[in-house]
Amino acid sequence: MSKILNVTQLGKTYASGNKTLTVLEDVSFSIDTGETFAIVGPSGSGKTTLLGLCAGLDQTDQGTVHLCGVALNELNEDERALLRNREVGFIFQNFQLLPTLTALENVAVPLELQGQKNTHGIAAELLEKVGLQDRKHHYPSQLSGGEQQRVALARAFSSTPSILFADEPTGNLDSETGQKVVELLFDLNKEAGTTLVIVTHDMELAQKTQRILKLKGGKVVTEENQKL
Amino acid sequence: MGTNRLKGKTHFHWILKMAWRDGRASGKRLLLFIGSIVLGIAAVVSIQSFSENLKDNIALQSKALMGADYRIDSNQPPSTKVQAIIDSLGGANAKSIGFPSMAVFPKNGNTKLVGIRGVEPGYPFYGDLETNPEEAAQTYHKENTALVDATVMLQFNLKVGDSVKIGNTMFSIAGSLVSAPGSNGVSASIAPPIWIPYQSVQSTGLVQTGSRIRYEYYFLANAKQNLEELDKVVDPQLDVENADLDTHLSTGQRLGRNYANFGNFLNLVAFIALLLGCVGIASSVHIYIKEKLRSVAVLKCLGATRNQTFLIYLVQIAAMGFLGGVLGVLAGIGLQYVFPSLLQDYLPFELEIGFVPQAVIVGLVLGVLMSVLFALSPLMGTWFVSPLQVLRVQEDNRAQSLETKFLVLGAIVLFVFGFAFWLLGRWDFALYFVLGILFVFLVLGGVAAGFMRLVKRFFPTQWGFAARQSILNLFRPNNQTLVLVLAIGVGTFLISTLYFTKDVLLSRTAVEATAKTPNLVLMDVQTNEKEAAAARIKASGMEVLNNIPIITMRMHQIKDRPVRELILDTTRTVNRWILQHEFRVTYRDYLANSETTVAGTWPADNQADVIPISLSENVAKDAKVEVGDRLVFNVQGVLMETVVAHIRTVDWAQMQINFSIIFPSGILENAPQFHVLTTNAANPEASADLQRKLVKQFPTVSIIDLRQVLQVVEGILGKISWVINFMAFFSILTGIIVLIGSVRNSKYQRIKESVLLRTLGAKGNQILRISALEYLFLGLLGTVLGVLLALCCSFLLARFVFDSVFVPSWQPFVIVLPLITLLVVVIGLWNSKTVISSPPLAVLRKETT
């Protein structure tokens, strides 16, 4: 099976006052196409930084990241944006919907960026799949947290990405709503056959994936396969 | 997948769609932004349209104002040379003789100083001689008939067919004169016109040697005649003969100059209104874009390029600018129709207001340009937003490069300079304006930064919770000190500058009327009539307020060069009027209220060989002389050698008798002279009674009833003040809207902190106290700095632009300063209102989306 994400000896440091803070050090792993994968670890272990680097949201200091066969450090910011638009979907802990756009428009944005036709038709179908067909003309402020995350799910799958990154997708939801969102996430993922990378500290959620990478203090502690 | 595939296109259609979607949901926040543009553009468009209309009307009507294409005039009968020039030009098409005289109306025995004009048929060739009845404009050319000023007809209850006695001749009134070329409100009030046939002038017996008579010769130009060239060639030849050539073009220019100061002020209002608009745009866009940075990060995360995200907001701001421009242009066009109805009495012609495409285009371009330029700096921020912000809040975006910042700043400075130059037409003034504005920004920014450091260093740890929180808000991250001190400071500065300069202009035109203010002036009182005239005034129970001797003289020699030689010298620097003017000079030993010493000492020593004299500043400047230079005067045939001992400024605007040249007493007492006596008549009846008695006793004395002149002048000044106040108010309104916008926008900066405090249990009044104190500190700092800077700037404006003495008005200190501070505090508290009246979570969800 081909590798959709290949991370080699990745390192990242930040300047903090006069000191240099090492957030990631010598991280290497790879993910197969269609695989579900979890990155876990306590707060401050570098999970979100790792997700940012893998999705091309930030630049690496050391090592390389190959996403969909492309070395991210060889791309400029706009080329990385285009790669994200074509190949990557995102789900964030705090939903990150555009507040001035309706639910339908939010879902349509990635398709519009690709220059596709019938964007609203596709977006409406996806909203129906996540059970929000009656809420498509509502603004994010008029939706509950669970509804907002479902809009975010529809948006993430709208451009049929090759890989989907989810950063603590249930972190801002109560357990019942979180449970429903997770079920929806895995159902949609299964249907689309997308590679799924989840960053979480919730072991229960992580155990739903095929592989788990444990981080601590910016280093890989273990990498284990799950028996699903 | 290879990198060669990663080439994206900017779909402009999508950018327009996103700009519309985002703008649609942000309408309320953009209202103040559009308001700033609308008011700024409206002021610019109305003032520019009005000025253009005024200029066009003056140009169009300059022929009608003169009644001919050009004219030659002189205060003496034409010399052989002048007559030869007139003949060489094909002879005058019409001529007139004019002089002031007292007219007697036998019907009721009333008298009045009038301006007699004996006119040949045909004149005016352009414009209308409006009479009532209409045919009187033609019929008055019959022997011994006259047209009498319409106001005088009303004043003395005269009818067509009644008589008027001028000199020795009785004239029958053919009609009333409603309007005639070349007369305006003020001169007509001093000496209302009476037109008589040219051939009847001699019979009045008033044209004698020594009379003040003006001879005018009117010409029609042929199609090929170049009037500018004619003026250049013929005028110097006429100068030598004490005659003058005026073309209708120069009349238009002169008329235009009359409105120069008024126009300058209106331009200042336009400049300030637009600057206030720019401040409004800058401050509202700054916070608006800051709010949008999270959305920008999300869009980038979803695959939008830097170009796309930048363009979404650029298009949105430009569209808002265009919309504001359209609304501003419409408001401005509406507003310019207000001016003429207010100024009609001041203008000697009917002003037709028309559509000025230039002002409309400029308004629309300015709307877009000012919006984009002043939004450019915050807009550039979208370029540097990292998509990583969707994962974690980064306080500092990747810093904008210094180059970009300087480029934007340079473009803004160039815009302000270009606009100032367009308005003022002088690059040096435009440069000073830009430097002044930059200085103001530097001072405000510098003081705000220094203030933050001081507060941080000397933080009052012992103060209570609310006070400490409010002080903390002034310097902690995400503070609004710099932005608000700049916005409040610049707003107050511009508003106060308008207040100060408005008062400088209005104080110049104020007319003080007290019992000691002369309102009746007796001109041309001969020395042998002086005592008797004074006795007549006293006998009527009035006081002689002034008894001023007047001696007429001409310059004979300036700094050892004879005037005749200077007139022929084409390289001379001395102004022409000095060489040919008949000066009316007085003598006294004191400085009047309207005068201030500029150089030298008051001429007291009259025993010296050379007579020390005092010159007004304008005469000294035009004659190119300084203290110590020698002048020789021709005093009716006698040459008198003098030295400039003293130079003074004269406030000519004050309604009193002022002089350019003053001799010390003891020199001119025996020279042929006449006198001007003034008095104050308490009411119109007393004034009329005294005038009747004086005219009967002294037929050659001219009397000016200043009561009427003062009324006309007061009326005109009242209207000018109204326009000045109205336009100033308009700009001030822009300033207040900008301030409301700036402070209101800061609400979004504080809302999360306030909600957090509320969540932690802070009481409503604690939140209010924190807000009130923070805005009070910011308001006070901004307004105090603004008023002080305005004081310096207004002094410079008064001195160099309006050429006036600067007397600071108290209003900015007593009204503007506390009111703006109060306004800032009230809006600050209003900002916190939603935080204390709703549950914290509801506020967060409502205000942050």
Image: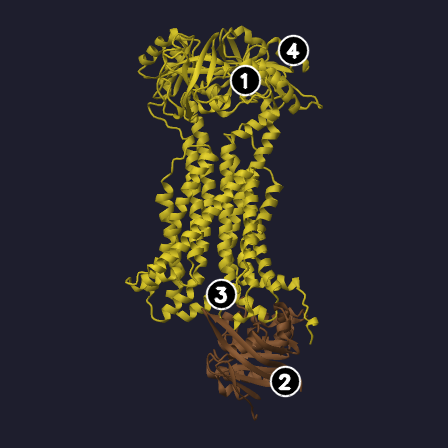
Chain colours: A brown, B yellow
Which circle, 2 or 1, is nearer the viewer? 2
Would you say residue B148 is visible in this rendering? no
Could you say which is closer to the camera, residue B160 or residue B693?
B693
Which circle, 4 or 3, is nearer the viewer? 3
**Local SS, label 1:** strand
Picture coordinates of residue B678, whole percent (x, y): 37, 17
Residue, disc 4: B84
- At label 2, counting other C-alpha atoms closer than 10 Å, the crowd grade (few under 14, some 14-19, many 20 or more) is some
Which circle, 3 or 2, is nearer the viewer? 3
Q: Which amino acid, by three-letter code, is at mark 2?
A: Gly
Q: Return the chain for callout 1.
A: B
Q: Is residue B480 above or below residue B587?
A: below
Picture quadrant where residue A162 is located? bottom right
Residue, disc 3: B396
Picture coordinates of residue B633, whole percent (x, y): 47, 13
Which is nearer the N-term, disc 1 or disc 4?
Answer: 4
Which is nearer the N-term, disc 1 or disc 3?
Answer: 1
Picture quadrant where residue A153 is located? bottom right
Give the CA separation, mark 3 to mark 2.
Answer: 37 Å
- Cβ atoms at labels 2 and 1 below 8 Å apart: no
Could you say which is closer to the camera, residue B741 or residue B833?
B741
Residue with the most extreme right position: B224
Disc 1 with disc 4 on a shared chain: yes
Residue, disc 1: B175
Q: Return the chain for callout 2.
A: A
Give the CA separation, mark 2 to mark 4.
Answer: 110 Å
Residue, disc 2: A34
Q: Which amino acid, by three-letter code, is at mark 4?
A: Ala
Which circle, 1 or 4, is nearer the viewer? 4
